[in-house]
Amino acid sequence: MKRIFIFATAIAVLLAMGMGSMGAVVAEENATANESVVEDELEATDDYHQAIDTETRITDWSYTSGRFTLTIEADETTRVSLTEAGTFEEGTSSFNYDEVRLEEGENTITFAVADRDGAAVAVATRQSLSQGTGAIVSTGMVEQNPFRHFGGESGLFSGVIMTVSLAGLGSWYVVRSEDSGVIEA
C-alpha cells in the first residue's frame, strides 16, 4: 500500500512540474506575441517624425534595459536637453538630466533612465522651451501578470489542483490504512 502511495505522489509531482513549465512556455509565447504587436505598431509609424521645435525632430527611438536610444535630426547645430520622465513612486526621488550638442544632420543619442514600468524621456531645445513645448518619448505603461511568480494562471491553477489532489490522496490513504475507519489521526 505504501508503494502505491509513493508511486502516486511521484506521478503527481512530475505532472505538476510539467504543468508549471507549460505555464512558463505559455507566458513566454504571450510575451513574444505582445512584443511583435508593439513592433508592428512601431513599424506602421516609421515615417512619423516627432517635432521638438521647427529645426529639430525625433526620427527614431528604441528602449532596452533602462536606456533610450534616440535618433534626432537637426537642421543646424543646436543643444538639446534630455530629462527622465514617466511614472515615479510617491515621495522624494531623483531623475537623470543631460544636455547634448547636436550637429547638423542625423544624431544618435543614448540616455539612461531608471528601468521601471512607464519609462520616458522628455526632450527640449532652447527654441522649444521659449515656445513652451518639447517632445516626450515613452514606453507606455507595461502591464505585468500578477500571477507571473506562480508560472502564470496555468501554474497557479495546476498548483491548486495538485494540492487538492494530494490532500485527497492522503485522506484516502489514512482511511484505507485503518482497520475500522479512522481511529487515530
Image: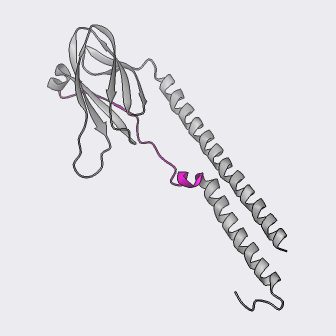
Q: Position of residue 21 (x, y in %)?
A: 66, 48
Residue at image position (85%, 74%) is: 1
State how the image is colored. Answer: one colour
Queried whether the magenta region covers residue 42, the answer comes back as: no
Give 45 or 65, whichever is nearer the viewer. 65
| Residue that lies at the very extreme toward the front in this rendered image | 3
Side (left or right) of 6 relative to 137: right
Q: Main secondary structure of the magenta part?
A: loop
Tell me where residue 91 appears, x and y as whole percent: 23, 52
Return the x and y of residue 49 as percentages of the image width and height. Answer: 37, 19
Q: Residue furthest left?
A: 130
Instruction: Please identify the quarter of the rendering in which residue 122 is found.
Output: top left
Q: Residue at x 24, y 45 (%)?
A: 93
Identify the residue at image location x=63%, y=55%.
155
Q: Is residue 162 above or below residue 24?
A: below
> In this rendering, is residue 125 above or below 180?
above
Span shown in magenta: 132-152
Residue that appears at 25% across and 33% down: 96
- Count of numbered tags: 0
Query: Is residue 137 found inside the magenta-colored segment of the image?
Result: yes
Quarter of the C terminus within the rendering: bottom right
Horizontal arrangement in the rendering, residue 48 relative to residue 175 (left or right): left
Seen from the viewer's position, the closer of residues 45 and 150 is 150
Nearest to the observer: residue 107 or residue 134:
107
